[in-house]
Amino acid sequence: MFKSKSMPWRHAAAIGLFVVGLYVLCLVWRVLLVDPEVVRFHLLALKTAFPGFQGMDAASMLWGGVLSFVYGFLASLAFHGLHKGCCGLKG
């Protein structure tokens, strides 16, 4: 069905999209925060995790989504590189 050589790339893309989903949840969580200190800390955490993130404007949110995908993609490829055969086909 699938060639085993393409599996790390497919998993990396899936993990990248999953991390983008977590990033979107983080942005939604930001809207629900009411304490100004927590909002300030949340913005600082986003600026630390995503270089170039400036605030809750469209360009920064898009850039954070791109970086989220890249982080998830690279982390998955690194995991596959360290654990060869972890997701191989069975049977």
Image (cartoon, rainbow, N blue to C red):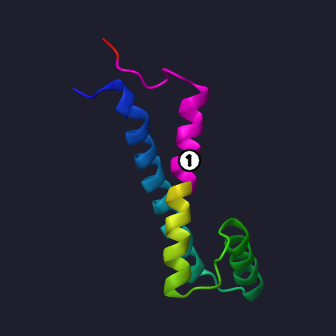
Residue 37 located left or right of residue 32? right
Q: Secondary structure at mark 1?
A: helix
Give the magenta part as a residue range: 71-89
The picture places residue 56, in percent across and down from the top left corner, at 57, 85
Q: Quadrant location of residue 9?
A: top left
The picture places residue 18, in percent across and down from the top left corner, at 45, 53
**Pick the front one: 5 or 18:** 5
Is residue 81 visible in the rendered structure shown here? Answer: yes
Above or below for 82 versus 42: above
Residue at image point 53% right, 32% down: 80
The picture places residue 31, in percent across and down from the top left corner, at 55, 83
Label 1: how many residues lie within 10 Å, few (<14), some (14-19) or many (20+)? some
The picture places residue 47, in percent across and down from the top left corner, at 70, 75
Residue 24 located left or right of residue 53? left
Above or below for 21 versus 33: above
In the rendered image, the residue lying farthest to the left is 1
Residue at image point 70% right, 82% down: 39
Is residue 28 visible in the rendered structure shown here? Answer: no
**Pick the front one: 30 or 77:** 77
Q: Quadrant location of residue 11?
A: top left
Residue at image point 53% right, 74% down: 63
In the rendered image, the residue lying farthest to the top is 91
Above or below for 24 versus 74: below
In the rendered image, which quarter contains the C terminus? Answer: top left
Above or below for 90 versus 34: above
Residue at image point 35% right, 25% down: 4
Q: Is the stretch drawn in magenta largely helix, strand or loop?
A: helix
Residue 59 located left or right of residue 49? left
Q: In the rendered structure, which amino acid carries the disc numbered 1?
A: Leu
Residue labelled with disc 1? 74
Residue 47: within the magenta? no
